[in-house]
Amino acid sequence: MKIVINALSALRGGGQTYLINLLNEFILLNFDCELIIITNKKNTHIFDKYKSNNITILESSFASKNIIFRVLWECMYLPFLLKVKKINSYFSPGGIMVTLTPKACKSYTALRNMLPFDERERSRFPLFSYVRFKLWLLKHVFLLSYKMADKVIFISQYSLTEVCKYLPEIEKKAQIIYHGINEDFLKTQDSTEYLQFNLVRKEYYLYVSILDVYKAQKEVVESWVEMNSKGNEIPLVLVGPKYNNYGEEVVDLIASSKADNINYIGAVDYNNLPSLYQNARGFIFASSCECCPNILLEKLASGRPVISSDIMPMPEFGQDSVVYFNPYEDGSLEKAVNYLEKENNLDKYSKLSSIRAKSFSWKKTTINTFKFLLNQKID
């Protein structure tokens, strides 16, 4: 059996991390198949290390030029390549399927971005903004892709349910496969190397995520300032990159609040996050739009208590191991923090986090993904 995986769009972030985790596990498992990974000039160096007897890296310089050249390559040349190489399965994990595969080749795609399908979250962006138009366009491109694909992977029940509202028939060709957890977050990290900014071990709440509208950092900061006025002294630490005006607004809000217990550290290298996680008192995750909340899973794996948004799909993943709050309801975060700070609740939810984290592993994700791509029964 031969499988082609399209990694042209996996240039950074979650898409790249997803494929890296799959490949790390694939080389440890005994799958009877050959892989061809199609790469972009900008990410070939990331995947080159996986070259082996059964993994081939194929870089497309033409498709690497820009999105127009990529679409042309996927529409015009890729079907020919799939036929010549006698490929059995073609997987485009980025969610866009524009390739008409040969009859002998099954096509697979996945949904890993819920923003295009969440009208409430799209409305948070300016009406005539590029981002809002892009999300509207992606919604229709994704729906067309799911119609074209033979099979579709969903990474949460919630995401499948939402797409069924547009394409009720998609359930017949869908498979839910949760993401796993990077094992580095499961290992004990006693290092205090990253406890800077006057942080004290087990004495700060940590919110790690990109700064963006649907992550509700402004609401979290405003709630923390209100809590401070009532005597709260526990530090809040925000970590994550900022790519737009919203990030600047969060930083300005922290500065104008003059709160000495709210710190924005900025982006932290992924490999250094486990130590920062495991030294935290607790976590906050206020996102209101996720497909599979990877950061929430990492926080559970760190074995510290989590306060999470109660908006789906977070409860699907956290279940009863998490304290929930509504990031857009006044006083909700304060109530959740006060509850967690009650006697024994920190220890209780630390244990529940560790137990829940055991439900997710990249080994299980990889086995189920490749069984699906190989048209085998998933346990």
Image: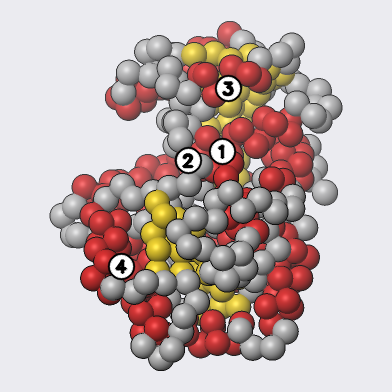
Report the number of discs: 4
* Above-or-below relation of 68 to 302: above
* Sequence-earlier tag: 2 or 4: 2
Q: Which mark is residue 254?
A: 4
* Quarter that holds the N terminus: top right
Local secondary structure at mark 3: helix
Amino acid beneath label 1: Thr
Q: Which mark is residue 17?
A: 1
For the view shown, which residue lies furthest in the front direction? Answer: 198
> What residue is pinned by disc 2?
13
* Sequence-earlier tag: 4 or 1: 1
Residue 95 screen position, x and y as percent: 48, 40
* Sequence-earlier tag: 3 or 1: 1
Q: Check contact, mark 3 vs mark 1: CB within 8 A.
A: no
Q: Check contact, mark 2 vs mark 1: CB within 8 A.
A: yes
Label 3 – label 1 distance at C-alpha: 11 Å
Q: Which mark is residue 47?
A: 3
